[in-house]
Image (cartoon, rainbow, N blue to C red):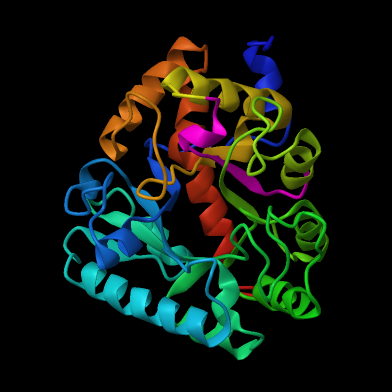
């Protein structure tokens, strides 16, 4: 694979955000679910404030569940997650609105509570309001298989359902984030068409580097960036290459995305505690190794700062702004 490393082409779309201090922000981790059900492998939640300024924690609902069962599973995981977070208020705080982001850099990790797989909506729009009131600020519409919202990557031909279309419209009127990770291709484009503000693709990689079904094709990446959305590059080794993956393989995807859609349209979405990682990465304590690898690939310091956190903080701030506020 031949990649052009000229930095000037990386800034094709939009202006980069500049923050006085560098932040580390991660758009996806399954740590809370793993802690509720068993034991997290990658993230020590009692140490995360040492390494991460803004962390999306997902409550994932198993793909095999639907309807009432999905709702009951979500409630069980949510209750356990809320209890875990409440016990760590000296290290973590929940992001409920745009103003909360001003607390970043004051010694605690900001947590965005995310739902992964909205099967628990079960055709009921009022649940969106209930989940918002409970503290969710990001909603991953599907997992790999279809649900009440639409088609996942296992059914790329399926559109958003009529209910899914209404749900996307409703979420577009709330200060929340619509996460398109796992959506099948047709539902992906349906969501872009309906979304009233820029959506998120929290964790995936580049199909042009490695043709995995969870990786975005070039046209999808461009459409996401053109809509003002942001693409979270993941550390899932299965999306990077065949066999054992390395940090270098992750950088291949990062450079590919930067060249195609610009530095300002990409961020990090580790998938810690939800996948297997490349060699050399154990958890958030290794974000520094990613930074060093980026510098060796020719990324400028301000580009590294943008990708490592500033882009995602800016995106979250915009998404959580109250309409008319």
Quick one: quadrant of the N terminus? top right
Residue 298 x %, y %: 52, 12
Residue occupying image coordinates x 69% and y 78%: 170
In the image, residue 15 sits, relative to residue 87, either above or below, namely above
60 or 196, which lies in front? Answer: 60
Residue 146 x %, y %: 68, 66
> Is 253 in the magenta?
no
Residue 197 x %, y %: 71, 61
In the image, residue 233 sits, relative to residue 148, either above or below, namely above
Residue occupying image coordinates x 52% and y 74%: 65
Quick one: quadrant of the C terminus? bottom right
Q: Is residue 280 visible?
A: yes
In the image, residue 252 sits, relative to residue 165, either above or below, namely above
Magenta stretch bounds: 226-242
> Is 229 in the magenta?
yes
Residue occupying image coordinates x 75% and y 66%: 196
Q: How many marks?
A: 0
Question: Which quarter of the picture shows residue 242?
Answer: top right
In the image, residue 133 sits, relative to residue 224, either above or below, namely below
72 or 64, which lies in front? Answer: 64
Would residue 269 appear left or right of 206 to someone viewing this image?
Answer: left
10 or 279, which lies in front? Answer: 279
Residue 152 x %, y %: 68, 59
Would residue 97 appear left or right of 255 to someone viewing this image?
Answer: left
Q: Is residue 175 visible?
A: no
Would residue 322 appear left or right of 286 to someone viewing this image?
Answer: right
Residue occupying image coordinates x 59% and y 60%: 143
């Amino acid at each position: 694979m031949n990649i052009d490393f000229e930095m000037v082409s990386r800034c094709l779309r939009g202006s980069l955000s500049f923050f006085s201090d560098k932040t580390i922000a991660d758009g996806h981790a399954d740590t809370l679910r793993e802690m509720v059900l068993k034991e997290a492998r990658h993230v020590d939640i009692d140490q995360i404030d040492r390494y991460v300024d803004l962390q999306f924690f997902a409550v994932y609902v198993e793909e095999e569940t639907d309807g009432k069962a999905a709702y009951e599973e979500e409630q069980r995981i949510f209750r356990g997650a809320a209890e875990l977070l409440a016990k760590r208020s000296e290290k973590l705080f929940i992001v409920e609105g745009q103003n909360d982001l001003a607390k970043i850099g004051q010694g605690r990790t900001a947590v965005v509570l995310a739902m992964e797989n909205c099967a628990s909506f079960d055709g009921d729009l009022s649940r969106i309001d209930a989940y918002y009131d409970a503290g969710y600020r990001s909603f991953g519409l599907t997992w790999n298989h279809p649900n009440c919202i639409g088609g996942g990557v296992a059914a790329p031909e399926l559109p958003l359902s009529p209910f899914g279309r209404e749900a996307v419209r409703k979420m577009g009127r709330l200060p929340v984030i619509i996460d398109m990770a796992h959506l099948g291709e047709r539902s992906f484009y349906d969501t872009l068409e309906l979304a009233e503000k820029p959506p998120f693709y929290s964790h995936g990689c580049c199909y042009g580097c490695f043709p995995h079904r969870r990786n975005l094709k070039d046209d999808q990446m461009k459409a996401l960036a053109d809509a003002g959305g942001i693409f979270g590059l993941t550390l899932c080794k299965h999306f990077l290459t065949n066999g054992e993956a390395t940090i270098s393989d992750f950088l291949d995807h990062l450079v590919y995305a930067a060249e195609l859609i610009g530095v300002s349209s990409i961020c990090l979405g580790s998938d810690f505690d939800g996948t297997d990682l490349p060699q050399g990465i154990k958890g958030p304590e290794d974000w520094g190794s990613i930074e060093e690898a980026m510098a060796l690939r020719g990324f400028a310091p301000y580009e590294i700062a943008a990708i490592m956190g500033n882009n995602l903080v800016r995106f979250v701030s915009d998404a959580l702004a109250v309409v008319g506020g």
